[in-house]
Amino acid sequence: MERVFVLGGGATKVGEEWEKSLRQLFVEAALKAVGDAGISLRDVEALYVGNMSSGVLQGQEHLGSLMATWLGIPGVAACKVEGACASGGVAVHQAYLAVASGMYDCVLVGGVEKMTDAVVYDLTTALMMADDYEYAASTGASFVGLNALVYRYYMKKFGVRQEDIAMFAVHDHKYAARNPLAQFQFEVTLERVMKSPLIADPIRLFECAPVSDGAAALVLCSERFAARIGASELVEIAASTMATDTLSLSDRADLTTLRATRLAVERAYKMARIEPSDVDVLEVHDAFTILGVIHLEDLGFAKKGEGWRLVVEGEVERDGRIPTNMSGGLKARGHPVGATGVYQVFEIYQQLKGIAPNQVSDAEVGLAQSVGGVGGTVSISILKRVR
Amino acid sequence: MERVFVLGGGATKVGEEWEKSLRQLFVEAALKAVGDAGISLRDVEALYVGNMSSGVLQGQEHLGSLMATWLGIPGVAACKVEGACASGGVAVHQAYLAVASGMYDCVLVGGVEKMTDAVVYDLTTALMMADDYEYAASTGASFVGLNALVYRYYMKKFGVRQEDIAMFAVHDHKYAARNPLAQFQFEVTLERVMKSPLIADPIRLFECAPVSDGAAALVLCSERFAARIGASELVEIAASTMATDTLSLSDRADLTTLRATRLAVERAYKMARIEPSDVDVLEVHDAFTILGVIHLEDLGFAKKGEGWRLVVEGEVERDGRIPTNMSGGLKARGHPVGATGVYQVFEIYQQLKGIAPNQVSDAEVGLAQSVGGVGGTVSISILKRVR
């Protein structure tokens, strides 16, 4: 396998972008990434677009050709990759394979979602397409409802108070407040989270990732390409993996763990030849506070039932043992579904380059986890600074 | 790059499958492919699902996890790949890269579309999502309408009669009549084609690919894997390429050529180290008769404006110079959009194994071309028999 490097990245500010279209968001992020990488658009040989719901929300498929056209580089190999809310992470994996294969030396990968559009149908229906239409969506279940089941089961099984789980939202907002790309650049108190409206018992509004528009992009390249343009101080993708689990919770033996995370991260640690203790900075897919807690456990940073302790005891802070969601996470940076996985890898890239808004001191190894559905798909990226 | 082989394939009969769901079609084809390859489902490490419109037609995304679940192999890496009507061909390319990278040794790739469903919205709208929503679909243009523009322009530019182009449908039906997987297993006369209802002037009903349900799948593997299971008489993917063009016709300099075909096939001939004259059997993406003619030209088998001669003069027959669409093509084998590209590669695989329904004598090299939109995306696969 060829070695794969992140040469540059860029992203739009996450928010409600009523004045920008899907293609505008994508092109804006892509041009930033190309600029940051110091390459020309003509260097791009292949383009991957991570997106979940453009068909339903924008009445638009064929995003590969669309974005190649609007970037002014029709001709390149291009396609859309979909893995529900993990679409961005999955697109990064495909772009990784494209370079690792030796077939492409310079690949642009971006994720984009514009959730404030509803050309064909509404957002709640669109998002529920991440679960089984025939056995889950058709019963009237919503995504927050499914996560509420997980939440309640977790609290009961491990005897954990909601206040300790909800702290994840407070944590995320603290860092989003200092991230210029974040949707919610303000802090919140635990009291405000706990008093926010109930969405699906026990989940409160301020425990949910928001509805977001945004796009993020990365330029990946081979060692050959990096050498040709004289790039130095590179960030390498030391591991890129994916795994699936049963699409629906109803087929799972245990609601408090995501098997796909465990499978994907086990492969990734092996591939990168590291252990959890080697990770200096972490981005997890906390679409709901409970998921953030579960991810810390499944990724190997806490025992089952104790992930919340890392938050409550400050271990996930910038100067803690495992600095987590320095971007503000899905909760406060925002969660433009198909873009989120790319935003996460972009944050890790910035951390390893030493240019992140909430910079972790001397970060050398970072990990990003992206989740689709309630863990039906998980992608893991491990990045390493190379001197 | 690792060498990549097709170890087995399978497909459902194309047709209107009112009694089978999207997942049933996919699983049926996948199990046939796994059986044909002589492997166990447990050998599969990654799964690619080519599909265009499951979101709008079935209210279902996240097909990677869905199909892994229904195949009984949740855990594998899996995702959906979309490139409009070329989704199947694009999925084959991604599966090819996955094996070529050296990361995966055994990959299952399938394409599926069930066009007779309309859970969220209608089929005509779904298909038009292959073109630009903001600049083409929103004007009321339909897909057959766009191809009618190409058709009329071609006839005028090269002084060709419609009867000579419409012969492509007669050709396709002749071979579909003997393909048990084909949707239309009967022959048609040119008179019947020319007297069929007008759909979008000048395109007649019998010049259009039908509305189809179907799924096809292939098992791709590395040399290492083939050796391990003692496979012999292999079929190798000698080249797998992709290219894009502007999404819409309105941005093209010439309506009578698909630049994406020329780019992709040029790369493919170079990669496989062959010339058009080395190709023994060909599958082209003739969603409309005019496209079949244009493809023969863009792929290098005829001069511009003369592709129709190959059909009229019998050169595309089973014993002709370049046997084409021995499956019955999109017109008569059927065109379940996201599956079509995989059906095409499956047909070529069967030809090289000597087990095709309309077997070309001693075929050693085959080429399949898959097209998305009106040429916005094109994928090319060149397969070679390896002794």
Image (cartoon, coloured by chain):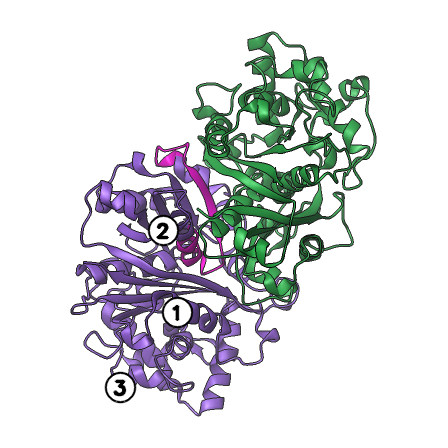
Chain colours: A green, B purple
Above or below, comparing residue A327 to residue A61 in the picture = above
Of the two numbered discs 3 and 1 in the rendering, the one whose residue sits closer to the viewer: 1
Above or below, comparing residue B103 to residue B122 in the picture = above
The CA span between labels 3 and 1 is 29 Å
Q: Secondary structure at mark 3?
A: loop
In the displayed image of the protein, which residue is found farthest to the bottom? B159
Give percent across and percent down for residue A76. Answer: 54, 63
Above or below, comparing residue B192 to residue A336 in the picture = below
Above or below, comparing residue A380 to residue A226 in the picture = above
Magenta residues span: B69-94
The chain holding disc 1 is B
Give percent across and percent down for residue B349. Answer: 26, 58
Does the stretch in magenta take in A385? Answer: no
One can see residue B244 in this view: yes
Three-letter amino acid code at the position of disc 2: Glu
1 or 2: tag closer to the N-terminus = 2
Q: Residue at x 71, y 47 (%)?
A: A11
For label 2, the residue is B2
Give percent across and percent down for residue B115. Answer: 43, 54
Q: Residues within 10 Å of mark 3 (few under 14, many from 20)?
A: few
Q: Are marks 3 and 1 in contact (CB under 8 Å)?
A: no
For the C terminus of chain A, the quadrant is top right
Q: Residues within 10 Å of mark 1 (few under 14, many from 20)?
A: few
The chain holding disc 3 is B
Rendered image quadrant of residue B66: top left
Q: Residues within 10 Å of mark 2 (few under 14, many from 20)?
A: many
For label 1, the residue is B270
Rendered image quadrant of residue B277: bottom left
One can see residue B119 in this view: no
